[in-house]
Image: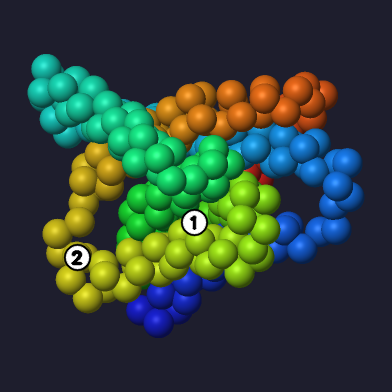
Amino acid sequence: MSTINALLVSFGAGMSTLIGGLIIFFNIKEKNINKFITLCLSFSIAIMIGISITDLLPTSLFTILFNIPTPLSYLIIILAFSIGVLIVYLISKLISKQQDSLYKLGILSMVALIIHNFPEGIATFMGSVEDVSLGLKLGLAIMFHNIPEGISIAVPIYYATKSKSKALFHTLLSGLAEPLGAFLSFLFLKNYINNLMISIILLLVAGIMITLSIEEMFPKCLAYKENKYIYLGLSIGTILILLNHFLM
């Protein structure tokens, strides 16, 4: 695949995040807003934990363990995951001084997904340049899970600020990280980036996503006391993750 087409695949995969953000244009009645937020947040929990457990952790762990001798590999694994956990706590502490918890969830999701999408963009670009079918498969798989990731950013920010432009802007920032990663890898990084480096970054991302889901999103879901919609969101998200792996 040509360089231009590889960049376009990464750009399309990243911009699919905005498709998820369009959910804020749905006309939700006032009495159903808490149910809708609960559904979206629990759906996002399933997506973030699902991606971490079925994709980020296995890929990262095997690559690190295969390429780095023990016990150094164990130390790197623990350190990378722990840094991800620490990032959530630090950003959460900074944001909580200024904004409500719903806005904080949206910003934390955006930060997590920017860090996630950047190495994804590199991987998609590299895969697309090397093999057309591999690049297209990677691009489709990423588009498939970027749409719900857009929901996890746009919904909490919109309902915290009542601003569609702010919700879409933050969703766009997350999506742009993917083509940015591809573009930088084309300009500077393609001779230096390797699978081991990407695996360490993705392990850090797994730490961010799992911590964000358990420590921030799930308590917020419980606070709305709409348990039926928690179960529904978790179920839909889990099914989507399974479909992503079986069909892609």
The structure residue drawn at horizontal position 54% and vertical position 61%, both measured from the top left corner, is: 171
Q: Helix or strand or loop: what does disc 1 sit on?
A: helix
Q: Whole-percent x and y of residue 84?
A: 31, 34
Report the residue marked by disc 1.
Answer: 138
Mark 1 touches mark 2? (CB < 8 Å): no
Q: Identity of the amino acid at label 1?
A: Leu
- Specify which label sits upstream in the sequence, 1 or 2: 1
**Residue 192 visible, this orientation:** yes
Q: Which quadrant of the figure has residue 60?
A: top left
Residue 22 lies, with reference to residue 75, above or below; the image says: below
Q: Whole-percent x and y of residue 216?
A: 51, 30
Report the residue marked by disc 2.
Answer: 189
Task: Characterize the local packing of mark 1: few (<14), some (14-19) or many (20 or more) Cα atoms within 10 angstroms.
Answer: many
Query: Quick one: which residue is furthest to the front in this view?
Result: 98
Q: Helix or strand or loop: what does disc 2 sit on?
A: helix
Whole-Å distance between the Cαs marked 1 and 2?
19 Å
In front of the other: 197 or 213: 213
The structure residue drawn at horizontal position 89% and vertical position 50%, both measured from the top left corner, is: 29
In front of the other: 110 or 148: 110
Q: Whole-percent x and y of residue 94?
A: 34, 41
Task: Characterize the local packing of mark 2: few (<14), some (14-19) or many (20 or more) Cα atoms within 10 angstroms.
Answer: some
Q: Nearer the viewer, mark 1 or mark 2?
A: 2
Q: Whole-percent x and y of residue 211?
A: 43, 28
In front of the other: 141 or 200: 200
